[in-house]
Each structure stands twice: as structure tokens, then as C-alpha cells.
Image (spheres, helix red, strand yellow):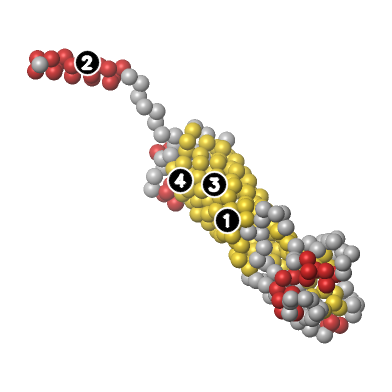
Amino acid sequence: MPRLSAPLAGAALLTASLAPAPAAAQSMRDGLYLSFGLGGAVVSGEQGTLFDVPAPCGYSPEVFLWSKGTTNCKPIPSNIPGYTVEEARAELVRTDFGSGLSFQLRIGYNILGYASLEASVLGHGDLDGDAGAGHVGGAVRIHPAQFWIPFQERPWDVDVSFGYGYSIGGYHPAPEVQRFIVGTDDEDDGKGWDGTNLSTGVAFNYMVAQRVSLGVDFKFMFPDWKEWFANWDKGYTGTPVESPDAFIFLPTAQVTFHL
């Protein structure tokens, strides 16, 4: 048996030298990319926001709707069954809407592995379609690993993002409150906000093919809601005394095509 060890070892070496080498891990890529994401949305916000009420309305905190330039000021009724004035305002005027599912579409360009410039469209809302928001904007992504390991030598990447954009969102208050506000014949009870947003986040990606990577993106968004819409069709709007609190957490799974 010992005399067979040398021939067997030689045959093993020859077989290994002739066998194809295992495929190398795909490396990260720079340049143009297109990314799709699906995930969730968790929204935290404020209820009962107060407005900068015109002088003819007497600056009453109960007023939530008016015709600009007139004295046609509409207070929140005190006779809504099951609701105080404060509770009715909290239901009518709020920024804690849009939790549920989310999607994200991004297109950008990675510059030599160090940074990326991108534009994105992002939406989220509940499963019933009663509340949701959309956000468009741009962002810069910084890729810190590139300062230590060139992207050509690794199949993975981590980035930190900073963005700015425009936001718009809407919701439907409880019908029993809405009925006392605008009357039973008005079925347009949609209300909402628009404004700007700041965002930040962190993402991880791993190449699974020559031009495809999979990953996760954790985005934190801070909307600066500037104008409230009491009725989208009639143009009833209100300006808050100060920007209401709002925070959105958007975790999504991503597939990215490196073009």
C-alpha cells in the first residue's frame, strides 16, 4: 500500500490541475445602475395640528377651515357623537398616516466606487388604500469600504445616504367626524399634506451575478409638511403654525441592475 501512495498523489495533482477553477465571486461595479425595492413603512406623526388662522376668524384654535379673504370661518362642531373638539381635530388634521407597504425605484451613477448620485421615487401606504404618501427626490450615497478595499476586489458593498426631495400624502378621516364637518352629501373626505423632506439611511448589497446585486435599504425620512389640504378638489388649504412632527422608517429589499 505505501508504494501506491506516490502514484495516487500524482494522479490527484494532475486531476486538480486539469479541472476548471471555481468561479470567482462577482465583484461590485461602478457606473450606471437601476434599483427596485419592496418593503414596509412605519409612520410616526402628530395629531391635532394648529393652523395660522386668518385674522377674520379670530385666531380660534377650533377653526380648521376658512375661505381666504372672507369671514367664512368653519369651527369644529362640539356636538360630534363620541368626540370632543380636541379628539375631532386629532382625527381630521394629522401626519401619522401611511404605514403599511412601500416600494422604491432608484436610478443613479456610482463614481469609481466612492460615491453615487441618484434620483428616486418612493411610495407607501396601508393595504386598504385609505392613506399613503409619495416622495421624489435626489440623494448622495457614500461608500466607505472603497477607501480600504477597491470595489473590484469584493462582491459586497455598504453605503450611507443623504437625500432631499418633495413629498405629498393623503388620508381619510373617520366618516362619522367628516360627516359633521362638511355635510352628508360631500363624499370627498380626502385630506392630506405636501412639503419637502430630508432623508438618511444605510444599505447593504451583494453581487449575485455579473450585473445584478441583492440587498437591503434602511431609509429614515423626515417630512417637512408645509400645507394641509382639507379638500383636494375645492382647494381648501391651511398653513400650520409650525411644521408638524413626522417621521417615516422605510426598510426595503432591493434588486439592483448594474448597467
Q: CA distance from mark 2 to mark 1?
A: 57 Å
Query: Looking at the picture, how far across and down is residue 130, in whole percent?
Result: 72, 58
- Which mark lies nearer to you, 4 or 1? 1
- Which mark lies nearer to you, 3 or 4? 3
Q: CA distance from mark 2 to mark 3?
A: 48 Å
Amino acid on which the number 3 mark rests in the picture:
Ala
Residue in the image at 60% along x and 43% along y: 36
| Label at residue 157 | 4
Mark 4 and mark 1 in contact? Answer it, CB < 8 Å: no
Question: Is 12 left, or right, of 100 in this rendering?
Answer: left
Q: Nearer the viewer, residue 232 or 182?
A: 182
Asked which quadrant contains residue 14, the reply is top left
Mark 3 lies on residue = 253
Amino acid on which the number 1 mark rests in the picture:
Leu
Q: CA distance from mark 3 to mark 4?
A: 15 Å
Looking at the image, tell me whether mark 4 or mark 1 is earlier in sequence order.
4
Query: Looking at the picture, how far across and down is residue 197, in whole percent?
Result: 64, 61
Mark 1 lies on residue = 250
Mark 2 lies on residue = 11
Looking at the image, tell me whether mark 2 or mark 3 is earlier in sequence order.
2
Question: SS at mark 4?
Answer: strand
Mark 2 burial class by Cα count in 10 Å: few <14, some 14-19, many 20+: few
Q: CA distance from mark 4 to mark 2?
A: 41 Å
Question: SS at mark 2?
Answer: helix
Amino acid on which the number 4 mark rests in the picture:
Asp
Residue in the image at 64% along x and 64% along y: 223
Looking at the image, tell me whether mark 4 or mark 2 is earlier in sequence order.
2
